[in-house]
Amino acid sequence: MKKVFINSIGAITSQKTFDNSEFLNEIVNYSTTNISVVNPNYKAYLDAGSARRMAKGIKMGVVASKVALEEAGLESVDAVITGSGMGCVIESERFVAKIIDNNEEFLTPTSFIQSTHNTVGGQIALGIQCKGYNFTYVHSSSSFETALLDAQLQLELDEATNILVGGVDELGPHMIKVHGLIDHIKQEQTIDNLNILSSKTVGAVFSEGASFIVLSNAKQESTYAELIDVAIYNTLGLTRVETKLYEFLKQNNYTVNDIDAVVLGNNGDVNFDEYFNKLSEGVFANTQQVVYKHLIGEYKTASAFGVWLGAKMLKTQQMPDCIKLNDKAPSALNTILIYNQYRGDNHTFVMLRKC
Amino acid sequence: MSELKEELKTKIIEQLNLEDVTVAEIADDEVLFGDGLGLDSIDALELIVMLDKDYGIKLTDPKDGKKIFESVNTMAAFIEANRA
Amino acid sequence: MSKSVAITGMGIISAIGNNVEENYLSLINGKKGISKISKIDTIHKDCIMVGEIAYTNADLEKSLDLPADHNYSRSSLLGAFAAKQAVENAGITNMAKYRSGLISASTVGGMDMTEKYFYDYIENPTNRKYIDGHHLGDGTQKIAKLLGIEESFVSTISTACSSAANAIIIGSRLIKSGKLDRVVVGGTDCLSKFTINGFKTLMILSDTYNTPFDDARKGLNLGEAAAYLVLESDEIVKAENRKVLAYVKGYGNTNDAFHQTASSENGDGATAAMEKTLRVANLAPKDVDYINAHGTATPNNDLSEGRAIIRVFGEEVPPFSSTKAYTGHTLAAAGGVEAIYAVLALQNNVIFPNLNFKNKMKEFSITPETSLIKKELNTVLSNSLGFGGNCTSVLFSKKP
């Protein structure tokens, strides 16, 4: 079986992350419970002709993938595998509203065709003329990791050499409204995002983003890290997280002591952060802990940015202060574990190693 | 007629999100699809809805759009001849 | 690692039947399930035909024995109904005995509830339980729970009209790689105003019975369905002495990379998907005994797919037909529905007729089978093509 490497990254998030020469050098603080991305200059990447029918999620996905392709020095890839928990919600909402508001009359196709979940992956393939394998996984918080696992299978068996893997989700006005009504979004009027992880209140800060990587079975100059393994569980009780973690480590011949840093998906929801606390106060109490959702908010493919962070730390051997949950000052960063779940379901482990 | 043509150009730009195109840049006889303005089959569907909504003209077969939407000239002539 | 991927169970609900047997009887008797729409109040009701399932949501809730405060969308109800059937059909009594996963496909998800309560949610708390049921993964989580699939690999695929066929591909690959021993795969989509109006704006809905591969075809009929298959490894088949219904022998997934919605004129993506499938199955074009075509009856699909079939099979195109005239186009479920029809064709050695066909298309000389044909079949190829350029083929066979 071949080894699998992360050869490049590209991320558009609520922080300025699309420039790969930087590593969270300046932090944007937000005071609301729904936050947008820091937009790159999309026009620099997209010609007007193709951009005119691109929903925001498509634009974010296409540009993040272009950043990743460029860094990997590739024009195209063998496969495009995308994860999106919600799909292109902005155009979906727009189409539903028009159906209701106009009583099904005078509707045009543009919103509809941009609303389908596979439209981001389709547009990326169209743009780079990739006629190979093209999949879109839409399973809540494990959407990105499923894409990652799919690519890993293909690369290990040498069925492909370079695969573009990414996660993209956008935030729509109706989604914000209704998820506020059911307390999935925090109820605070104003908030200090950098401190949400200790908020002790219910709900999360909703946001959006796109994060793509080129995964390859050939290591090169630009390589960030080796992908060791991915594990996905649809359900896990609070008491089962540690058990599954040990299983996952054992399968890959690792122990807890081998993990130099653990990247946790805490989002400040008092009802569900206990899963992360279970690890940070238990088995990883003496391990360096890293968090990121206070910076980029919560969305169904937010953990793709967790992988981005892991890759970036392993390549640069740096750890910005803004992502440290504790300070254990690891002497070196060789192995990083990323754990995420959303509202107690769809748990994922991703393990990366320094190259 | 020329007023209608200007109106159509404005609508085409707005409806089809042609951000970088101005009314002045679209000649009356410019080919709208393919090589000319670069419109495609989805744009044709958008224009069919525009005919219906703004001018009360219904097309049932998208293939009919091909001749009608050849240029701003042909569109204007069709609307003049068929509008309610 | 498993060398082959066995199909050991099937479950389906569609406009032509509430189980596998009923679907088969409709297929061999030429009984289509296309009608005027009755369950959705749409202004288009007089100018469209659909493949609607007879069961109401209340019927399905009752059958699934759900509590009154459940928040299943119709897609989830249909999916749970069909997936349970598949698992029962396979004779599985202890899901946890083997590493079991679920891959479900959908494009509509909880959209039926979202479009119903879109503004109501804001004014009125009564139906807010459906808000979190909007996303596509929600139904899959529910089905997994009902089937007893826990702490395992569960995912949802959405690649438009090829979704369930792709669920079969990833399920097969997970078994072959040894990641899982058993995977329930399939898809579910209910009718919704969203899809009706979406396809209406593309002007590809027919106002009468759809006529796949006919020169005068006017477009598709939307349908609703859920269909699931149980895939199991060699090891389970041996240990449990399973009756194997058929095998997933090959598959291919490609992208047309041509246009956001339309297929390329010569069906580049579909051609590549079929060729890839034959390579994976290690078979030659002449080894294919029947093609269950995607054949949606839109002008664009049937021309593009027909040309792709000719490109792959040349002078000797095997018998082919589309079963969309029976069920309508069931979107994400179509690949699952037609996988089951492919297995039924193999089991019974029959080719199902392409209903409503009258006129040969002028662009090529191939025509679909129009009557029920009895013929020894060893392999069936099933095509699923979708928006976003997604093209998928799966090859089913009697032998591993």
Image: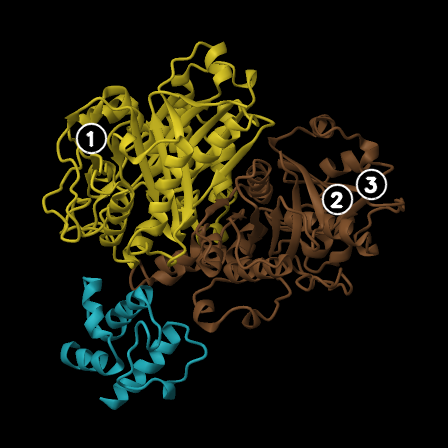
Chain colours: A brown, B cyan, C yellow
Mark 3 and mark 1 in contact? Answer it, CB < 8 Å: no
Residue type indicated by callout 1 = Phe
The residue beneath circle 2 is A263
The chain that hosts pointer 2 is A
* Numbered circles on residues, count: 3
* Quadrant (top left/top right/bottom left/bottom right) for the N terminus of chain C: top right
The residue beneath circle 3 is A260
- In this view of the protein, which residue sits in the foreground, C399 or A166? C399
* Quadrant (top left/top right/bottom left/bottom right) for the C terminus of chain C: top left
Residue type indicated by callout 3 = Asp
Residue type indicated by callout 2 = Val
The residue beneath circle 1 is C352
Q: Quadrant of residue C257?
A: bottom left
Residue A304: where, in percent of width, then height?
64, 48
Disc 2 crowd, CA 10 A, few/some/many (<14, 14-19, 20+): many
Tell me the mark number nearer the camera, choosing from 2 and 1.
Answer: 1
Residue in the image at 43% along x and 48% along y: C114
Residue A147: where, in percent of width, then height?
56, 43
* SS class, disc 2: strand
Left or right, C148 with respect to C191, comes to: right
* SS class, disc 3: loop
Left or right, A344 with respect to A335, comes to: left
Residue C12: where, in percent of width, then height?
33, 28
Mark 3 vs mark 1, CA separation in Å: 60 Å
